[in-house]
Amino acid sequence: MDIEKLKKLADSGNMFAQFDLADRYYKSNGVAYDFDRSIYWFKKAAEQGHSKAQRIIGEYYWGVEENPEMAVYWFKKAADQGEPYSQAKLGNCYITGAGLEINEAAGIEWLTKSVKQGNVIGYFCLGLCYFHGIGVVRDINYALELINEAARLGDLEARNFLLKLKKDLNL
């Protein structure tokens, strides 16, 4: 779509146009790279309920602004809409207490929802919970199934975890 038409649609309140415009500013696709404008438009789309924009704003507050409470706020909005990455992040926040009080049962619930959608982070985090018995009865076999799946899907932390485990067990 022509950038001027896209800007008009975004200005008129179309959340999909707002998301697309934000993405273009972030990736310098048809416009010059502008991080601040990308965040502005992602926030506009997020405020209207765009789940991917909510996830991105959650990540912004998590990593750039270092405001875990606001990150959790946006992850929760996206997770409630079924966005799997946000479900995994929210589950991990409940497990670790980052941005809210620790609630292992809620953490396991969100991680499980994420895993049911095939989210790699969910597999690894839920696997670690089963490995260490956090919020669940410890089950090493199930933990390794989950962590192996995360590694198979390309998660480097999962691969490193398995390599360290093999080394520690002299396998």
Image: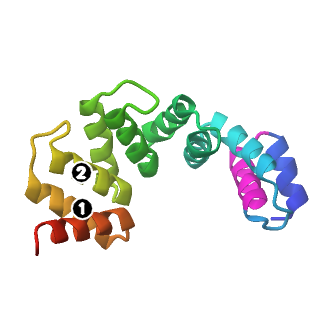
Q: Find residue 11 and report its horizontal and vertical position in percent.
A: 84, 42
**Quick check: 97 above or below 58?**
above
What residue do we see at 85% from left, 51% from top?
Answer: 7
> Residue placed farthest to the bottom in the image?
171
Question: Which residue in the structure is indicated by mark 1?
Answer: 147
What residue do we see at 77% from left, 54% from top?
Answer: 21
Q: Is residue 134 left or right of residue 18?
A: left
Q: Find residue 87 and report its horizontal and vertical position in percent.
A: 40, 44
Q: Secondary structure at mark 1?
A: helix
What residue do we see at 30% from left, 72% from top?
Answer: 152
Residue type at numbered disc 1: Ile
Q: Which mark is residue 128?
A: 2
Q: Is residue 35 left or right of residue 82?
A: right
Q: Which mark is residue 52?
A: none
Mark 1 vs 2: CB contact within 8 A? yes
Q: CA distance from mark 1 to mark 2?
A: 7 Å
Quarter of the image for the N terminus: give it. bottom right
> Residue placed farthest to the top in the image?
101
> Residue placed farthest to the right in the image?
4
Q: Is residue 157 left or right of residue 44?
A: left
Q: Find residue 119 and report its horizontal and vertical position in percent.
A: 37, 57
**Quick check: 96 above or below 164?**
above
Range shown magenta:
13-26
Viewer-nearest residue: 36 or 117: 36
Quadrant in the rendering for residue 136: top left
* 23 within the magenta span: yes
* 35 within the magenta span: no
Residue type at numbered disc 2: Leu
Q: Secondary structure at mark 2?
A: helix
Mark closest to the chain's N terminus, 1 or 2: 2
